[in-house]
Amino acid sequence: MEVSVTINGDSHTHDVEPRTLLVHYIRDVVGLTGTNIGCDTSSCGACTIHVNGESVKSCTMLAVQADGQDLLTIEGLADGDVLHPMQESFRQCHALQCGYCTPGMVMAAVSLLDENPDPSEREVRIGLEGNLCRCTGYHNIVKAVLHCAEASS
Amino acid sequence: MIPAAFDYIRAGSAEEALAALAEHGDEAKLLAGGHSLLPLMKLRLSTPAVLVDIGRLDDLSYINDAGDHLAIGALTRHRDVETSELVQSQAGLLAEATSHVGDPQVRHRGTIGGSIAHGDPASDLPSVMLAMRATLVARGPGGERQISVDDFFTGFLETSLGDDELLTEIRVPKMPDATWGFQKFNRRAQDWAIVGVSAIVANGNAGVGLVNMDSTPVRAAGVEAALVGGAPAADAAEAAAEGTNPPSDLNAGPEYREHLARVLTRRALEAAGR
């Protein structure tokens, strides 16, 4: 079945099997491998991208469901060489260790601040409950999100 | 994990969805947000031959004030229910419970109708439907019918919806003056409830729904009767596990779940001011 999507501003059209998961489409068909597959059971959030501006787990969506939608992946966040403020905050606050959860964590964090620009620490922790860090580096991740919120206000 | 192959039909209207269901019968499954169905399909616990995607039926995504009740379109996303001022003011229990469904990403995709039609006893929202005595509206080849929530959940992941029917609307009584409590007990962030309780009290009436205490979502009828009879929260909550048949899994056995049901019901009732 034909699927047309916009990813990071670029249009893509491909013929895919209906059972193709969106994350497999993005990684294997389009070739954008910044989005990671972690648990593959919609628990860990490593595959988080934005669909029409909102965080979504791309392992729990079919590519055909994304037909006609506007997608943003981690590759589309920076403006050329200038990091997105959330990426910059992650760098400043050392909010990544092994880095595997980072693309999904950043995408979830950007969506979180879009909905709640001035969150409390508790709201950040609850807002990121759909993203797991196996290094357990949550302390600096939360710090980075709060730092980004403060820097943007 | 990749689902088994299926034929995909994107419905452009409720009528198209019903026609596809009529043609394919029990070989077809409806796909709304997909956050209950797709995980099952990836594990190959569900292998529908035909998937009818109703995710674009925007006319079934709404929250309306319908006089004595709120009319919520089945395809309304959790995020929209959770943040709706109308739901917050008229059905606070539903808004609160919805904010505990999954995580933000799940709530951006999952729908109220999908969650309820899935009929999972471990889901949060069916307990709210039971506590608030909601009415479910289904459309089928013979037209529309209303189903009391007490007749809706018929077995494990089974409901009284026919293979050829589509859940279109959830009707929740407006209860702006009600007091309520929602309790969800789990060990890890975003887990399913080991046990959960929705309790609401208004005008001398009480509604209490339980999560994960039987093979279907169930009402704590004994607690409701005790409350109507004037029993204090702690006494009424003692009846929470009566008549239930709780499941056993890695997290908890039946006895522990019965204990949790009593404790969480007491807490929910205390939060409701009883």
Image: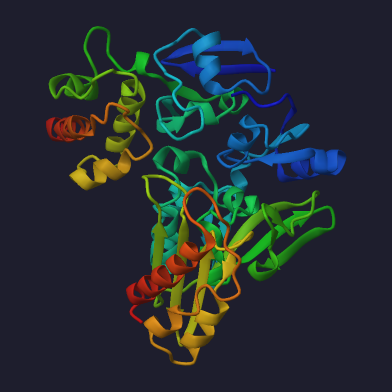
Question: Where's residue B24, x and y in %?
Answer: 84, 38
The image quadrant that residue B4 belongs to is: top right
**Numbered marks: total:** 0
| Residue B91 in sight in this render | no
Give the residue displayed 21% in from the left and 35% down from the top. Answer: A142
Extreme-bottom residue of the structure: B229
The image quadrant that residue B151 belongs to is: bottom right
Instruction: Give the side of residue A134 with respect to residue A142, left or right.
Output: right
Instruction: Give the side of residue B15 with respect to residue A92, left or right.
Output: right
| Residue B182 in sight in this render | yes
Instruction: Give the side of residue B202 with respect to residue A18, left or right.
Output: left
Q: As rendered, which of A53 and A139 lies closer to the eye?
A: A139
Question: Where's residue A67, x and y in %?
Answer: 59, 23
Q: As rendered, which of A131 and A71 lies closer to the eye?
A: A131
Q: Quadrant of the C terminus of chain B?
A: bottom left
Q: Is residue B144 above or below residue B200?
A: above
Give the residue displayed 77% in from the left and 52% down from the top. Answer: B165
Q: Quadrant of the N terminus of chain B?
A: top right
Give the residue displayed 81% in from the left and 49% down from the top. Answer: B164
Question: Where's residue A81, x and y in %?
Answer: 23, 7
Extreme-right residue of the structure: B23
Q: Is residue B266 above or below residue B97?
A: below
